């Protein structure tokens, strides 16, 4: 078997495994099942295991892009910059992520902000992951062998004023459970990005699928429609139809 055929076969097996695993979780009430609600042009950017699906229509070097949650993986951001010449505003308050970004040689279009995004302005306790090899912290209460850190956070509406933006064209967020509050605040403030790419964390026992179901319903009511769901069922891509008119 050639290397290419082997990789294709292994990729198909991984997708099949994820599909079966998701179905088992759905049947056990630990996950939810959704399908795409609209069709559009789609491309995936970023390394395998860290890619995001977006719609390229309407994106240009003038687009405003916010990427919430950096960690130590910015392949999506860099491909976005390389393909469209877009300036990416990236946000992460965790010290390890800040240090990692500072150690990289990055294009000028990658603009990093060492604070977090929440549904309030102030200081928030971030709890570290159980596994010290992982980088992502969370605002959610959980058991951790290491102490929490305190970091500055701001609402999206506040950040937009700070950066002089009147709209966001593409919003990507992987913020470890804080997405539900940020999405609710975004909708309440009438902020309407053309696209929202979000990783939902409903598989965490302290969250559950009900919160993701409610978030999707609220986004639908605001005119957003799902155009892609990753094989893992965690990353969703939404597009706002009401901005097309």
Image: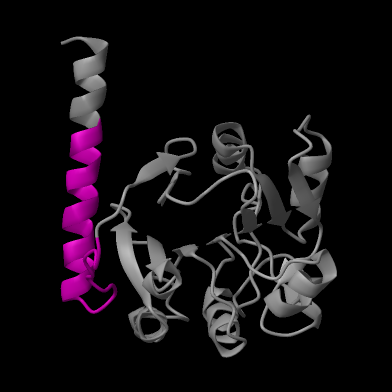
Residue 185 appears at what percent x and percent y? Answer: 60, 85
Q: Which residues are magenta?
A: 11-38
Q: Is residue 41 left or right of residue 219?
A: left
Where does the C terminus fall, quadrant-wise? Answer: bottom left
- Residue 148 can be seen in this image: no
Colouring convention used in this rendered image of the protein: one colour
Main secondary structure along the magenta-highlighted residues: helix
Q: Is residue 161 left or right of residue 211?
A: right
Name the residue located 68 percent from the left edge and 49 percent from the top edge. 88
Quarter placement of the N terminus: top left
In the image, residue 19 lies in the stretch drawn in magenta: yes
Q: Is 1 contained in the magenta span?
A: no
Please tell me in which quadrant of the rendered image residue 175 appears.
Answer: bottom right
| Quadrant in which residue 78 is drawn | top right
| Quadrant of residue 32 within the rendered picture | bottom left
Q: Nearer the viewer, residue 48 or 150?
A: 48
Q: Is 135 positioned to the left or the right of 11 in the image?
A: right
- The residue positioned farthest toward the front in the image shown: 245
Q: Indicate left or right for 217 with 137 as reference.
A: left
Q: Residue at x 65, y 49 (%)?
A: 62
Residue located at (20% from left, 76% from top): 28
Residue 126 horizontal/vertical position (percent): 72, 71
Name the outermost residue toward the bottom.
Answer: 188
Q: Is residue 225 visible?
A: yes
Q: What's the residue at 74%, 71% (across, down)?
A: 160
Give residue 236's position: percent from left, percent from top: 38, 62
Q: Is residue 46 above or below residue 141?
A: above
């Amino acid at each position: 078997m050639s290397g290419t055929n082997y990789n294709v076969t292994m990729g198909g097996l991984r997708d099949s495994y994820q599909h079966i695993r998701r179905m088992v979780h759905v049947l056990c009430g630990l996950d939810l099942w959704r399908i795409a609600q609209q069709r559009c042009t789609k491309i995936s950017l970023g390394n395998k295991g860290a890619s995001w699906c977006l719609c390229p229509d309407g994106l240009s070097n003038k687009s405003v892009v916010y990427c919430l949650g950096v960690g130590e993986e910015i392949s999506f951001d860099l491909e976005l910059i390389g393909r469209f010449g877009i300036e990416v505003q990236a946000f992460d308050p965790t010290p390890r992520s800040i240090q990692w970004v500072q150690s990289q040689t990055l294009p000028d279009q990658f603009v990093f902000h060492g604070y977090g995004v929440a549904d309030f302005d102030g200081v928030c306790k971030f709890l570290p992951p159980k596994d010290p090899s992982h980088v992502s912290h969370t605002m959610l209460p959980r058991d951790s062998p290491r102490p929490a850190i305190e970091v500055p956070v701001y609402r999206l509406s506040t950040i937009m004023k700070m950066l002089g933006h009147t709209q966001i064209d593409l919003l990507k967020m992987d913020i470890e459970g804080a997405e539900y509050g940020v999405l609710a605040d975004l909708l309440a403030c009438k902020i309407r990005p053309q696209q929202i790419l979000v990783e939902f964390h409903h598989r965490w026992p302290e969250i559950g699928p009900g919160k993701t179901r409610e978030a999707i319903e609220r986004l639908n009511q605001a005119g957003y429609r799902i155009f892609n769901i990753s094989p893992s069922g965690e990353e969703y891509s939404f597009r706002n139809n009401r901005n097309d008119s």
